[in-house]
Amino acid sequence: MKLSVKKRDIHGKKVKNLRAQGLVPAVIYGKHVKAESISCVKNDLLKVYRAAWYSTPVELTGDVDHLVLINSLQLDPVSDEIISADFLAVSRTEKVSAKIPVVTFWESQLEKLNEGKIMQVRDEIEVEALPQDLPNKFEIDVSVLQTVNDVFFIKDLKVSDKVTILDDPELPILTVAVIEDEPAEEGEETAATTTEEAPKAE
C-alpha cells in the first residue's frame, strides 16, 4: 500500500492554504528518523486509511521514502474532515506495537431468538510484531456464542505465531447480556389481581 507525499515548508496558520487545495499537512517521525513535515492529497490519504487503518504499514513515496504506520488523524470537530496526520516511521526488521481493531460478523442464535444480546466490551487489542506481520483487524464470528453464559476472551483469538498479544489473554472481548422480560404495566397488573381475587357469585 502506497501514499504519495511532498515535503512541506509551510507551517502555522498558513497551512490553511494547503487545505484549501485539498491537501493535508502531516508529520513523519520515528525512532531512527528525523521529523519531517510533508503534505498529501486528502482523498488519497482517506482511501489509504480506510484500507490500512492504524495497523497496516504504508509506503510513503514521492519526496520521501519511508515505511510508516498511520499514528493519528486530527479531524475537524464540525465537518469531520481530516485536517492533519501523524505518521510513525518503522523498520521492516524491528518489531512495533500497535492496537488492532476488533470487528464482528454474522449473528448469534441468541439474538435471533431474543434470548440475549451480544455486548462488545473491547474494540481493539494491542499486539507486537514486525510491521509487515501486523494483522489489519481481528474478525470474530458472533455465532460461536451459544448460551447466555458464553464469553469470547482475548485468548480465543486465532493469531499468527509471528504476532504477540500484549493485552491480558483472560480479558473478555464479547459477552452476552440477558434480555429480561419487561414488567407488566401497573394498570394491567392491578386488573389481573382484581380478577383473580373477585369472589364467585352465589
Image (cartoon, rainbow, N blue to C red):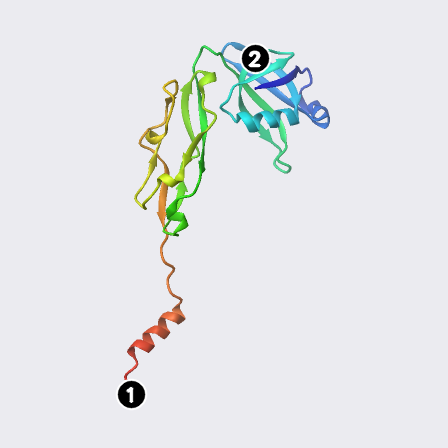
Task: Identify which amino acid the numbered label 2 is placed on.
Answer: His
Q: Is residue 53 above or below residue 9?
A: below
Task: Identify which amino acid the numbered label 1 is placed on.
Answer: Ala
What is the residue that sits farthest to the bottom in this orientation? Answer: 202
Q: Decide which of tag 2 and tag 1 comes sooner along the chain.
A: 2
Tag 1 residue: 201
| The image quarter in which residue 191 lies | bottom left
Quadrant of the rendering where the N terminus is positioned: top right
Query: Residue 169: horizontal and vertical position, in percent?
Result: 32, 29
Between 134 and 188, which is closer to the camera in this rendering? 134
Between 32 and 114, which is closer to the camera in this rendering? 114
State the separation of the CA atoms marked 2 and 1: 92 Å
Q: Is residue 131 above or below residue 141?
A: above
Q: Is residue 197 above or below residue 100?
A: below
Mark 1, other Cα within 10 Å: few <14 / some 14–19 / many ≥20: few
What mark, if any, has residue 98 been given in the picture? none
Q: Residue at x 54, y 10 (%)?
A: 33
| The image quarter in which residue 63 lies | top right
Q: Is residue 73 left or right of residue 6?
A: left
| The image quarter in which residue 58 lies | top right
Query: Residue 8: horizontal and vertical position, in percent?
Result: 67, 16
Query: Residue 21: horizontal and vertical position, in percent?
Result: 73, 25
Tag 2 residue: 66
Query: Residue 149: horizontal and vertical position, in percent?
Result: 30, 44
